[in-house]
Image (cartoon, helix red, strand yellow):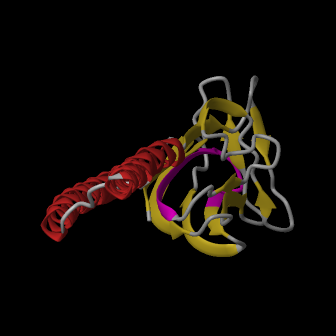
Amino acid sequence: MERVSVLCLLLLLCSLSGAEHQDNEIKPEPQPCLSDLHAVLREMSAKLAKYEVRIEELQTHDQAQASELKSLKTRTNVTENQVESLRRDRAVGQVAFSASLLESGSRTLGPFNAQTTLVFKHVVSNIGKAYSPHTGFFTAPVRGAYHFEFYILAHGGSHSSAVGLVKNREHVFITGEHQTNAYGTAANGVTLLLEAGDVVSLRLWENHVIYDDQNHYSSFSGHLLFPM
């Protein structure tokens, strides 16, 4: 009887010890299944593809804006150049002068034993300041077509009048008049293609005279027709 009791007691202790051992074991957490991982990866790939498409759209938009900005800058530069060209053409196109020989009084110039540059001192207009009333020279500011006219008055006497137009010391045209006992006028004109810096003036021919008074008969005029 005692043996049976001891055996029952041993069985009870073993049973309690096994239950305690099972309670003390760490149970592993459940791991996600492979199909769930695939689903997450597919979702992340889809979002990444959307982001890439959006980035490409933004890059395309930025490139379009940059191209439009570059085109706008180009058009702006062209417009500015056109405005500057028009302003420059207008500025250089404003060239004209007209002057008579004497500022006041009356006088006969000549005769001289050599050709003499005439200085027309009574300036009526000098737009562009290309004519100098100190030297009698007209200096072309730009390359272009210029037109010149000159008038002289001949005074009765033993000497006739003869005046020539000179370009860079090269004779171009001449006009002349001779009166023995009265007054006579002569005139001439010419259109010249001048380079910037070319000089045009009038010369009194040797052994000839020219007359002018307060009525300003003898004059020299010129203007730029158009630049080239």
Q: Is residue 98 left or right of residue 46?
A: right
Looking at the picture, tell me which residue is in the foreground, 116 or 92.
Answer: 92
Residue 97 location, x and y as percent?
Answer: 57, 40
Looking at the picture, tell me which residue is in the foreground, 127 or 148.
Answer: 127
Q: Identify the image quadrant of residue 105.
A: top right
- How many numbered badges does the structure rendering display? 0
Residue 176 location, x and y as percent?
Answer: 56, 59
Residue at 14% across / 62% down in the picture?
A: 39
Single out the residue that lies furthest toward the bottom. Answer: 170
**Magenta highlight range:** 144-163
Residue 176 in view: yes
Residue at 16% across / 61% down in the picture?
A: 36
Q: Is residue 219 left or right of residue 71?
A: right
For residue 37: magenta? no
Residue at 62% across / 55% down in the picture?
A: 141
Residue at 17% across / 58% down in the picture?
A: 43
Residue 78 in view: no
Q: Is residue 61 above or below residue 191?
A: above
Q: Is residue 45 above or below residue 211?
A: below
Quadrant, the C terminus: bottom left
Q: Identify the image quadrant of residue 35.
A: bottom left
Q: Is residue 214 above or below residue 67?
A: above
Looking at the picture, tell me which residue is in the foreground, 65 or 183.
Answer: 65
Residue 7 location, x and y as percent?
Answer: 35, 58
Residue 49 location, x and y as percent?
Answer: 20, 63
